[in-house]
Amino acid sequence: MLAILGAVFCTLGASAIAQAETADVQTAWRLLDYMAVDYGGAVSGGRIKNASEYAEMTEFAASVSARLATLPPTPERARLLEGATRLQAVVAAKGSPSQVADLAHGLAADLLKAYPVPLAPAKAPDFARGATLFAQNCASCHGAAGDGHGPNAAKLATPPIAFTDLTRARQRSPFALYQVIDQGIDGTAMQSFSSLPSDDRWALAFYAGHFAFSDAAAKEGERLWKADPSLRQRIPDLTALAGLTPETLAKSMGPEQADAIIAYLRRHPEAVVQQAPGSLDVARGKLAQSLAAYRAGNRHAAQELALSAYLDGFEPLEPMLTARDATLMGHIESAMGEFRASLQQGRPADEVATRVQVLGGLFDDAEAAMSPDAASSASTFVGALTILLREGLEALLIVVAMIAFLRKAERPEVLPYVHAGWIGALAAGALTWAVATYAIGISGASRELTEGFGSLFAAVVLLSVGIWMHGKAQADQWQRYIREKMSRALSRQSAWFLFGLAFVVVYREVFETILFYAALWTQGNGGMMLAGAGTAILLLGLIAWAMLRYSRDLPIAKFFAYSAWLMAILTVVLAGKGVAALQEAGIIDIAPFAGGIRVSMLGIFPTLQSMGAQLLMLVAVGGGFVLNRRRAAAA
């Protein structure tokens, strides 16, 4: 028993010593960081600007030496003490701010190498939580905008720090802010918030560190972060981000770019966490933050978080879930759209909360459907088959119709442009696969924008082509038209137009198919996936052969008529798909259509905007066809 008690007391004693050592290291580091940033306010040009601040700097320099002397003996401690003595001498001689900053930063870095202490949060700080904590604990002094002009600021002998001061902000890391939040600043009104959980202190540190950098800079930083893979090597994890100052980063890229990247990462520290694209945990977390922001009255932030929940959390998982359970995927996509619509419409918070609960249950079902146990060779084969067949059929119908039309028109010299278009789209798809897999990854917004704008472009083009073909079907003198007009109608400019149309309609489908196949590939069963893809390619080849074979035997008037109706149908389908994709990217608002059906293959989605776009296309097609008949009758 005595031995056990002795061991316990030894353990407790060692723990207390370790805690004391850590506290001394952290305090010394904080003092050094503070001196590096604030010494310029005390001395300038070898003269004292502010006597009280200079006295503080002198005290801090002495305190650093005293704390370093109490640390356990190591080979590095003697060098640290020499550095502290040199720093004291420079301060006493009223050295330049740059000289003090270099000495203090260098000594702080050496200190952490010799006596390592925790430098980073255990998980990505919650920026929304930081905003709430700042409003509760800091805004009264530092101001809601972080400018140092809070309601209580005038009462304080030492003015609160203005976090909007860009010069000082460029020299501060989140770790430095965390240390101040944790320990406070002696002799000032800045108290210690060590009673807060560590995660909350880190959230506060990142939030306080964002004020000096604008939202516009953060948007530019997001673009740079996603476009430059080398940035992930410079800032590989939270430890690197927590200890990084904009001034340090600017040495390798310039101050404007460094400010932009820091602006983005302090708002979105989760961006440096290496994880697979898409996560239901991310979607759940963003939805919870969105609800909290909505309850707090910040509707704009709630909408942004809801959109992020879809684009960054759920949307990358759609291909895998579609292959496993397309019905469930449709339910979740609709439910997330309805949730965003309820935020836009200002629905009661309790109703919004109910939608979050419903989505939570759907996410549970999705996790079960996407679990490794749910995967099988049969499901992989069927998924690969149906995905390629569904996506390929749309593009195939358009390209084969173009080829058949050119053959009917006896213009074989234009065919290479169409073939170059769809072959180029396949090559671009292969390049997209390589870039998405090995370099940058494709964001959810980019996917939806590519699909949305590509669909709408193709829909508008097919509308004009369909009406034109319908008009030719009404012409009794089609042979004369072919002979007299076709040489002018299919000029080199028109040939390049056909190339562009073939490229867009095929690349749009290839792009989406890549996403589905990339998801299937990660599940294993690669052989069955290739078998499914091969079967789909065989079926698409047979369909293409049949269409080209039997289109030759059709009278030209019937060919034009059938092609016109095919183009009209595809126009309506693509219009619905395009609007739905832009809604998912947050470009177009969502107004759910109560009781509406969802048939994604036909572009039918239960929203007023997508169905309205399809109705508009139907009216345009109908009007064009009626006008063609009147012209034919008049002729």
Image (cartoon, grey):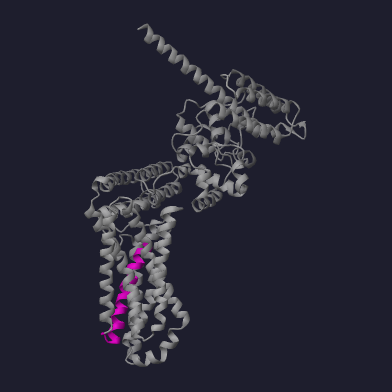
Please determine whether, in this image, residue 400 is positioned above or below residue 76. Answer: below
Secondary structure that dominates the magenta span: helix
Residue at x 57% of width, y 20% of height: 71
Quadrant where the C terminus is found in the figure: bottom left
Q: Between 420 and 67, which is closer to the camera in this rendering?
A: 420
Q: Tell me where residue 551 appears, x and y as whole percent.
A: 28, 81
Give residue 444's quadrant in the image. bottom left
Query: Can the viewer see residue 623?
Result: no
Q: Is residue 57 above or below residue 316?
A: above
Provide residue 579's location: percent of width, then percent of height. Answer: 38, 63
| The N terminus sits in image quarter | top left
Vertical placement of residue 192 versus 462, above or below: above
Tell me, yes or no, whether the highlighted magenta stretch contains residue 181.
no
Report whether 403 appears left or right of 226. Answer: left
Q: Nearer the viewer, residue 365 or 163?
A: 365
Q: Which residues are magenta?
A: 553-579
